[in-house]
Image: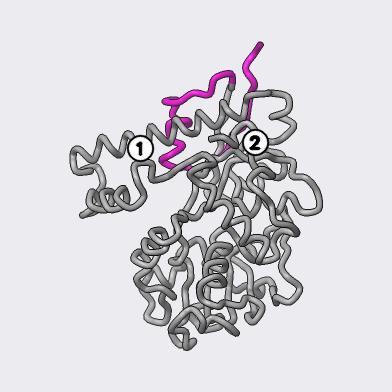
Amino acid sequence: MSDIQLDIAFWQYDRTKALTDGTVTIPGVRARFHTAPIVTQIFEGIVRGQFQVAELGLTYYLRTFRGKDSPFVALPVFPNRAFRHSAIYVNRASGIERPKDLNGKVIGELALYSHDAGVMPKGMLMEEHGFQPETCKWIIGGLDWPMKPIDFVAKPHPPNVSVSDIPEGKELGAMLEAGEIDVLISADNPKCILENSPRVGRLFPDYPAVEREYYERTGIFPIMHTVVIRKDVLESNRGLARTLYDAFQAAKQAAMKGYEHLHIFNNMDIMFPWFSHLIEEDRTLLGGDWWPYGIAANRKTLDTVLRYHYEQGITEQLYSIEDLFAADLLNT
């Protein structure tokens, strides 16, 4: 039987490099790898049928279920994950000193109401700090550059939450600095933060300590993106889910071994002081497999993210892990 040809897309990560450079091959697959400068372009590509396998934001994936079964099934591969207390930016003149002060404010959010970096902050704030999204006015748009509205997945929000698109010609980063919005929730850093504007800051200024404490207390390392395969492709190629999962796992392991090897030489290829110490701190906290794939190591995190989607009105039902992931990978 000839190899199947697949168009596979993901952003340029260290944990996928071994696939694109040929260090790790996918048995039975002739792969053409694709990427894009903005990761949502990859999401749009898989949703519109450009790729058979691709990275997809977890919230984007869940939105493909709305009112019907999804045309995709997920692999428990998580190329992008990040702690998100750091994703909440505030205008210093807005009178926000603690999380509960967010209630009643005007909040900008990148790309979607409850985008991947918005679901976790909202969920954590609601669960731990009494945050009520329905008391706020939400403005959705681009950060510091023009961004066309997301139109390739559903954009639900609860009926009692005020959500509107950003005014034409406006950008959320500039609006935050000018005080036109009080708060910004964004996967990316706004320019005003990168340029150390005195007018803006983070809700949690010492976010590394807050995020580490959150992990120590909950064991949750938030997941942003997964990898999906079209169901019709999977149904025609039994065993392909496991083959792909093993390849992504091997690529991640290659990256981890590379870091372990370079650590012997004090990471002299990286021009950041104390980088070696950061590695040691992270491994002490997160363990030897500090970026886990598979279901078992991520069950609590996945259950939490799925619950947050339901509680925030993004999904019409509370989905389970079994609803999302390939059946033959539920034991990973």
Question: Between 301 and 143, which is closer to the camera in this rendering?
Answer: 301
Front: mark 1 or 2 = 2
Q: Position of residue 64 (x, y in %)?
A: 72, 50
| Residue under label 2 | 326
Give how far apart the Cα atoms at labels 1 and 2 are: 25 Å
Quadrant where the N terminus is found in the figure:
top right
Using residue 85 as the reference point, say whether residue 64 is left or right of it: right
Q: Residue at x 41, y 59 (%)?
A: 215
Q: Taking the image as drawn, is residue 171 in sight?
A: no
Which is nearer the N-term, disc 1 or disc 2?
Answer: 1
Question: Between 46 and 286, which is closer to the camera in this rendering?
Answer: 286
SS under mark 1: helix
Using residue 82 as the reference point, say whether residue 288 is left or right of it: left
Q: Residue at x 74, y 57 (%)?
A: 317
Residues packed near mark 2 inside 10 Å, few (<14), some (14 to 19) or many (20 plus)? many
* Looking at the image, residue 168 lies above or below residue 2: below
Q: Taking the image as drawn, is residue 201 in sight?
A: yes
Q: Position of residue 143 (x, y in %)?
A: 54, 66
* Looking at the image, residue 18 lies above or below residue 106: above
User: In the rendered structure, are the residues bearing label 1 and label 2 in contact, judged by CB atoms less than 8 Å apart?
Assistant: no
Dot 1 amino acid type = Met
Dot 2 amino acid type = Ala
* Range of residues picked out in magenta: 1-28
Question: Between 297 and 144, which is closer to the camera in this rendering?
Answer: 297
Asked whether residue 304 is drawn in magenta, I would say no
Q: Position of residue 99 (x, y in %)?
A: 48, 78
Q: Residue at x 65, y 72 (%)?
A: 166
| Residue under label 1 | 256
